[in-house]
């Protein structure tokens, strides 16, 4: 009897795995297990696994994580769907139960949904453009942080001592976000920056815990929290700690805000909008202190680790590919000399531009993108996809496709330089994603990468502390990042 039951169970599992996509009207994909889906089948880095599956099942395929998600891993199909039919893919496929538990709903800028994302994103973009990306003040700060980082490295790395570049990069990047969000900066070494970093890290680690991931398919798991060592309670605590820091900073901003002057930062614009609405007797709607705190937390979560990690990859590549570093330095020496580099200089530094794009392609820090949700039935790459289906615009797999980029793992800025020595933008490289939910901080991030990296190589040379540069090993966290490494930093003047 037991054997029969076991055989029946195995038969049902196999039937489920082979037929579930067909039954649900979804594109084919790797056979999922009941409950677990394909979560245990990611063996390589995720961008590579998804690329491999796209070659096997087609560029549009289904993966269960643990719910069904339709993956698009082809540049042209991404353009035809996510970009050209952007309105269909504006919503996010969020962990609804998790969000309800943490922030009483879908707030913020990253995981906000249906009713409010358009309004909040439009407002944030407008505010960030006004305050940050178009004004010179943030660029000036980036330039001075770049110089400060270089000065710290020169001190730490004096007499050829190999150093870890992470901490000073973190201070520079963190301060730019703090300035954009709260209008103030902190000293390098201010314990607040490390505190935020630590709490947000715990929050991210907590979100990736299997129990937390299962909350949306099996909400009752909350009652089994103690059995697994309280991962759900730990996540709540980490989130509350993060939000408390944001509220404390917002209190400082609110106290120093002058409503008669131009906004200094995103929080100022937000407070001014609340007051404007109140004075006009309008509904303040989603313009609440709660939304503001979650939005500033999202700016940190989305903008800090991504930028620091990209810069850490860049310095590892400079150390490992000295010829590329020398070409950047030659270009800067010839066109700029020792004066401060500005965003205007992008036009006269084609090789540096090519190197930065190549850093973003090769590092591919987002192994797997965020998922969207279809708001109507839509055809993607010949497949009819129902309304309310989770969609993964998997641009990172395009970056590592050997049919598009020869030896994709090889760092080669020359890929982006034409015969006339000009920088040629490759539209298939989209590290900031695409469509209506593409990165909101792209302007700031591009500015940081350009000003920081060009200033670094203008002032310093990066070399390996050993004869052969250490292999680039990576760790999977919120983003893919390099394992800790040391580098020799020598002053050029
Ligand atoms: C090198 C640095 C960065 C990279 C590679 C990067 C990349 C990305 C990617 C891939 C997404 C997901 C887009 C999607 O869902 O399809 C995203 C979203 C986002 N990023 Fe960035 N990002 C960077 C820096 C920043 C910075 C500096 C900020 C802000 C200060 C920022 C704010 C955001 C926000 C708010 C979202 C959510 C947008 C939405 O869902 O509407 N990012 N970013």
Image (cartoon, rainbow, N blue to C red):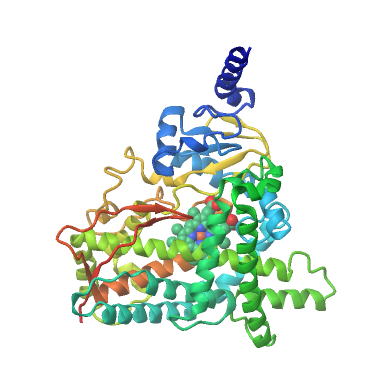
Viewer-nearest residue: 476 or 356: 476
Q: Position of residue 491 (x, y in %)?
A: 22, 78
Viewer-nearest residue: 342 or 460: 460
| Labels in figure, total | 0
Above-or-below relation of 67 to 310: above
Above-or-below relation of 21 to 149: above
> Dividing the picture into quarters, in which one does residue 386 lie?
top right
> Dividing the picture into quarters, in which one does residue 16 lie?
top right
Quadrant of the image for the N terminus? top right
Q: Position of residue 387 (x, y in %)?
A: 68, 37
Q: Is residue 368 left or right of residue 410?
A: right
**What residue is drawn where x is 59% and y is 77%?**
182
Above-or-below relation of 88 to 61: below
**What residue is drawn where x is 39% and y is 53%?**
475
Q: Is residue 237 left or right of residue 160?
A: right
The residue furthest right is 281
Viewer-nearest residue: 227 or 174: 227
**What residue is drawn where x is 43% and y is 47%?**
396
């Amino acid at each position: 009897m037991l054997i029969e039951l076991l055989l029946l169970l195995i038969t049902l599992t196999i039937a489920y795995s082979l037929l579930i996509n067909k039954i649900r009207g979804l594109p084919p994909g790797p056979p999922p297990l009941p409950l677990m889906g394909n979560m245990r089948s990611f063996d390589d880095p995720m961008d590579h696994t998804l690329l491999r599956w796209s070659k096997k099942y087609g560029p549009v395929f289904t993966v269960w994580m643990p719910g069904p998600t339709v993956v698009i891993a082809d540049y042209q199909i991404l353009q035809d769907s996510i970009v050209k039919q952007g309105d269909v893919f504006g919503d996010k496929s969020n962990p609804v139960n998790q969000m309800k538990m943490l922030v009483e709903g879908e707030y913020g800028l990253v995981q906000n949904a249906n009713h409010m994302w358009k309004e909040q994103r439009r407002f944030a973009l407008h505010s960030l453009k006004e305050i940050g990306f178009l004004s010179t003040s943030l660029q000036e700060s980036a330039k001075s942080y770049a110089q400060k980082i270089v000065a710290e490295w020169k001190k730490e790395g004096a007499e050829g001592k190999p150093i870890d570049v992470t901490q000073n990069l973190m201070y520079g990047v963190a301060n730019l976000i703090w300035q954009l969000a709260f209008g103030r900066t902190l000293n390098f070494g201010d314990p607040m920056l490390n505190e935020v970093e630590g709490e947000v890290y715990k929050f991210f680690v907590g979100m990736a815990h299997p129990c937390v991931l299962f909350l949306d398919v099996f909400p009752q798991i909350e009652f089994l929290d103690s059995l697994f060592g309280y991962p759900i309670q730990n996540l709540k605590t980490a989130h509350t700690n993060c939000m408390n820091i944001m509220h404390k900073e917002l209190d400082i901003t609110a106290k120093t805000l002058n409503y008669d002057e131009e906004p200094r930062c995103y929080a100022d614009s937000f407070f001014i909008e609340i007051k404007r609405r109140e004075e006009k007797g309008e509904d303040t709607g989603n313009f609440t202190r709660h939304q503001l705190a979650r939005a500033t937390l999202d700016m940190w979560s989305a903008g800090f680790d991504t930028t620091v990690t990209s810069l850490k990859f860049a310095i590892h590549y400079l150390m490992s590919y000295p010829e590329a570093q020398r070409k950047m330095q030659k270009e800067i020496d010839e066109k700029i000399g020792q004066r401060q580099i500005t965003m205007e200089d992008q036009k006269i530094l084609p090789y540096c531009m090519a190197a930065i794009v190549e850093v973003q392609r090769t590092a591919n820090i987002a192994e797997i993108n965020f998922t969207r949700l279809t708001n109507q039935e839509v055809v993607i790459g010949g497949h009819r996809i129902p309304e309310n289906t989770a969609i993964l615009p998997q641009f990172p797999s395009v970056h590592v496709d050997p049919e598009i980029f020869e030896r994709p793992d090889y760092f080669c800025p020359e890929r982006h330089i034409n015969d006339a020595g000009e920088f040629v933008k490759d539209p298939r490289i989209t590290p900031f994603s695409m469509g209506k939910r593409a990165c909101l901080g792209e302007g700031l991030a591009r500015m940081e990468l350009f000003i920081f990296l060009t200033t670094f190589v203008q002032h310093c040379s990066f070399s390996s502390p050993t004869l052969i540069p250490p292999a680039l090993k990576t760790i999977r966290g919120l983003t893919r990042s390099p394992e800790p490494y040391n580098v020799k930093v020598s002053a050029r003047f």
